[in-house]
């Protein structure tokens, strides 16, 4: 089975699961995403387990399993001791299943009464059995296991058995085993399709689940040069959402050569991030995924209580948000929020610039060799005063800004705000700063009734090559020194450093006279019209009387 065919079948599975939920009254229900993502993951882990047991190092076990048409049937003949021994050969990050957990076993149990209870108990038992591998936690150390009761979301208890049977019936038509060698390029598409209906609402006001892959790709490629030898590094996102940026940077570095750390206030997006890690061979990082408020209670700290430092940080933080309830807890943290914390607005509290707090937190979380890419509203790059200006001054004075890319408008589906990406680099003290105006790149497309700008691979290559080679390109990019930025009032806008060009056109004396006569005639007409309007206004005023 080819990768393209299994991608089609996987998307069909997702559609079928959504149709089943809709048939039982759960379409667009707040719990639908829990059911869809958990059932999808159950299928994925079942097939992953089968793939791993058929490839164990123990020759006898491997031979017995591969010679059988169905690995589930072969495992029935294993003694309990053999089965236990088999599990000991599995990789540390591999799911562990009891024989009663298999989808094939659930299929065979469908005719039994109270099947929904058995189904839910099985899901919970899988979660508990794999808690050490797949559980993430909150900032207060509460564990969030992989699965929970599913059929309980059907209010009519008489329909729960049929609902459970309908879900199981969708899982037996194909197998994931052929694509376990695939990574980001395959599963990012699947993941986006899986959550596309659940990243619009219901995730809490902090959550913005999806950063366009073009933006994520640019951020990763500008932080990590192709072919760069990197190993044993840490990657962090303090407002991770579903993890698109983390997956992109991990893929650029190599999933086995980095460890992921994250925190996000939304439990929903944190669970989606965990799913993303499982799909992308980053299970070893799940213990570092924290659900909680990064600004108020940053979880990742040293034993001395200081902020943990990271080698790579990527983030698309929320821009504007009412955080007036927690603002007083931040205001006194002078060292972390060195440029200040936005004041509580008297009106329109939802416009408070929370991203400025995340940006300062990121700056304070970079290691001595750290690099970061952070999405900000484009107004940040030229703001003449306030916290924005103070942060830019800090980045220049500390010589840790590597470049800025101003993106095309409407590149995000969820906001019309123009955005730029800041690239920080603690080791760019002596280097040029590359400012790129990519606002004219991309093509306008219509998706789900919304106009969006999409960057092509050529557009992305142009940005990446210009950035890494520190090129100055007419009407596109400039490479400037820190002193030049200071002279321009710390502006990060490429346009302010580009020469203004005036184009001259040669014309004959006769053409000049004709143009000037046209200008005079046009002005005379406008002046005459203006005089008429003035007279009319005066007449109207004279006719006004007090009643």
Image: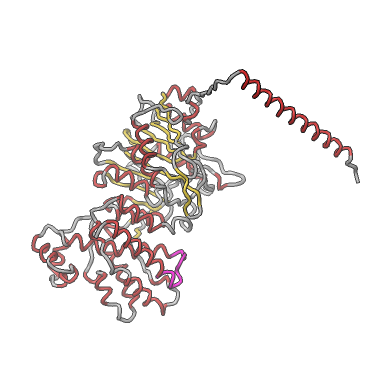
Q: Is residue 80 left or right of residue 476?
A: left
Question: Which residue is painted at 86% across and 37% down in the image?
Answer: 539
As drawn, the residue found furthest toward the top would be: 509
Residue 335, visible in the rendered structure:
yes
* Residue 174 horizontal/vertical position (percent): 27, 65
Q: Quadrant of residue 367?
A: top left
Compared to residue 220, the image places residue 520 above or below, namely above
Question: Which residue is painted at 38% across and 30% down in the image?
Answer: 400
Q: Quadrant of residue 215?
A: top left
Compared to residue 93, the image places residue 331 above or below, namely above
Camera-nearest residue between 522 and 18: 522
* Residue 326 horizontal/vertical position (percent): 50, 47
- Count all numbered tags in the image, as a single digit: 0
Q: Quadrant of residue 359?
A: top left
Camera-nearest residue between 150 and 46: 46
Give yes or no for residue 22 being in the magenta stretch.
yes
Q: Main secondary structure of the magenta part?
A: loop
Compared to residue 530, the image places residue 192 above or below, namely below
Give yes or no for residue 63 being in the magenta stretch.
no
Q: How is the image coloured?
A: secondary structure
Q: Is residue 312 left or right of residue 54?
A: right
* Residue 544 horizontal/vertical position (percent): 88, 41
Camera-nearest residue between 76 and 68: 68
Query: Which residues are the magenta region?
Result: 20-31
Compared to residue 403, the image places residue 132 above or below, namely below
As drawn, the residue found furthest toward the left would be: 60
Q: Quadrant of the N terminus?
A: bottom left
Question: Which residue is painted at 46% across and 64% down in the image?
Answer: 30
Question: Which residue is painted at 31% across and 47% down in the image?
Answer: 260
As drawn, the residue found furthest toward the front would be: 510
* Residue 17 horizontal/vertical position (percent): 37, 67
Residue 139, visible in the rendered structure:
no
């Amino acid at each position: 089975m080819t990768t393209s065919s299994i991608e089609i079948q996987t998307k069909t599975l997702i559609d079928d699961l959504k149709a089943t939920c809709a048939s039982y009254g759960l379409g667009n229900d707040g719990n639908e995403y829990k059911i869809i993502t958990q059932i999808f993951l159950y299928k994925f882990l079942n097939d992953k387990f089968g793939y791993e047991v058929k490839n164990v190092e123990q020759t006898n076990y491997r031979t017995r399993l591969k010679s059988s048409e169905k690995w589930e049937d072969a495992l029935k003949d294993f003694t309990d001791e053999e089965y236990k021994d088999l599990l000991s050969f599995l990789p540390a990050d591999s799911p562990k299943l009891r024989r009663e957990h298999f989808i094939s076993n659930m299929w065979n149990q469908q005719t039994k009464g109270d099947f929904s209870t058995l189904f839910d108990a099985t899901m919970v038992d899988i979660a508990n059995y794999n808690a050490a591998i797949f559980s993430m936690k909150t900032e207060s150390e509460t564990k969030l296991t992989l699965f929970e009761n599913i059929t309980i979301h059907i209010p009519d208890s008489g329909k729960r058995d049929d609902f459970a049977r309908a879900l199981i019936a969708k899982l037996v038509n194909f197998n994931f085993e052929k694509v376990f060698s695939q990574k980001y390029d395959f599963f990012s598409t699947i993941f986006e399709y899986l959550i596309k209906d659940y990243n619009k609402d219901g995730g809490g006001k902090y959550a913005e689940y999806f950063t366009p892959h073009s933006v994520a790709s640019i951020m990763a490629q500008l932080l990590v040069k192709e072919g760069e030898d990197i190993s044993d590094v840490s990657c962090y996102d303090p407002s991770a959402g579903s993890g698109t940026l983390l997956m992109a940077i991990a893929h650029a570095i190599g999933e086995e050569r980095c460890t992921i750390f994250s925190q996000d206030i939304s439990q929903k997006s944190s669970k989606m991030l965990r799913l993303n890690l499982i799909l992308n061979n980053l299970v070893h990082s799940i213990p570092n995924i924290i659900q909680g408020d990064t600004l108020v209670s940053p979880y990742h700290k040293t034993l001395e209580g200081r902020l943990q430092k990271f080698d790579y940080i990527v983030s698309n933080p929320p821009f504007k948000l009412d955080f007036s309830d927690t603002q007083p807890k931040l205001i006194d943290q002078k060292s972390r929020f060195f440029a200040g914390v936005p004041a509580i607005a008297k009106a329109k509290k939802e416009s408070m610039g929370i991203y400025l707090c995340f940006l300062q937190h990121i700056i304070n979380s970079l290691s001595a060799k750290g690099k970061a890419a952070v999405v900000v509203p484009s107004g940040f790059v030229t703001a003449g005063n306030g916290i924005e200006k103070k942060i830019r001054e800090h980045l220049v004075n500390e010589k840790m800004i590597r470049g800025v890319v101003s993106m095309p408008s409407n590149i995000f589906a969820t906001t019309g705000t123009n955005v730029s990406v800041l690239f920080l680099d603690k080791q760019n003290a002596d280097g040029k700063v590359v400012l790129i105006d990519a606002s004219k790149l991309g093509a306008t497309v219509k998706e789900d009734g919304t106009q969006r700008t999409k960057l092509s691979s050529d557009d992305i290559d142009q940005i990446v090559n210009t950035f890494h080679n520190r090129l100055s390109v007419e009407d596109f990019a400039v490479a400037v020194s820190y002193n030049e930025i200071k002279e321009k009032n710390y502006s990060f806008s490429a346009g302010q450093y580009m020469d203004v060009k005036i184009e001259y056109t040669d014309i004959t004396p006769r053409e000049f006279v004709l143009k000037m006569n046209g200008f005079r005639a046009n002005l005379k007409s406008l002046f005459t019209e203006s005089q008429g309007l003035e007279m009319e206004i005066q007449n109207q005023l004279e006719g006004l009387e007090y009643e």
